[in-house]
Image (cartoon, rainbow, N blue to C red):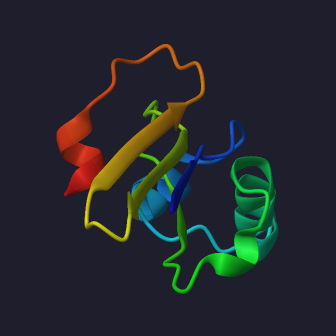
């Protein structure tokens, strides 16, 4: 799961330049974000054997939201994007790279 979080509106241009597409290391806590998603998607999330988590800032004006990849026992993959509303166009190449 990758949580794409917005840069603060009050951020200076220096902060924006230094933090676009970089790890987000302030609240909300990553474990709380993941727990909220897993509890919403699964009745029994104790059956999930492995999880990879990351949260980071988007690029300036970029899409915010959740991106995840889930593999089933039969190795089928589900990629889901749950974007929040954003005035800028969705740039898939910058998110998956």
Left or right, 68 with reference to 10 = left
Q: Residue at x 74, y 79 (%)?
A: 46
Image quarter (top left, top right, bottom left or bottom right) of the C terminus: bottom left
**Residue 91, position as x, y percentages in the image:** 26, 31
Most distant residue in the bottom direction: 49
Q: Nearer the viewer, residue 37 or 96?
A: 37
Q: Nearer the viewer, residue 19 or 76?
A: 76
Left or right, 82 with reference to 21 = right
**Residue 96, position as x, y percentages in the image:** 24, 53
Q: Residue at x 53, y 79 (%)?
A: 51
Image quarter of residue 36:
bottom right
Picture layout, residue 9 above or below residue 46: above
Picture layout, residue 53 above or below residue 66: below
Residue 74 visible, this angle? yes
Q: Nearer the viewer, residue 45 or 84?
A: 45
**Residue 80, position as x, y percentages in the image:** 42, 41
Q: Nearer the viewer, residue 42 or 81?
A: 42
Left or right, 6 with reference to 96 = right
Count up the numbered dots: 0
Most distant residue in the top direction: 87
Q: Residue at x 44, y 66 (%)?
A: 22
Q: Residue at x 35, y 49 (%)?
A: 78
Image quarter of residue 77:
bottom left
Image quarter of residue 48:
bottom right
């Amino acid at each position: 799961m990758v949580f794409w979080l917005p840069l603060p509106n009050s951020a200076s241009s220096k902060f924006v330049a230094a933090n676009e597409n970089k790890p987000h290391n302030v609240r909300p806590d990553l474990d709380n974000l993941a727990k909220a998603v897993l509890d919403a998607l699964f009745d029994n999330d104790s059956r999930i054997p492995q999880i990879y988590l990351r949260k980071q800032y988007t690029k300036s004006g970029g899409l915010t939201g959740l991106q995840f990849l889930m593999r089933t026992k039969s190795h089928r993959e589900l990629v889901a994007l749950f974007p929040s509303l954003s005035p800028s166009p969705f740039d898939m190449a910058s998110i998956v790279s």
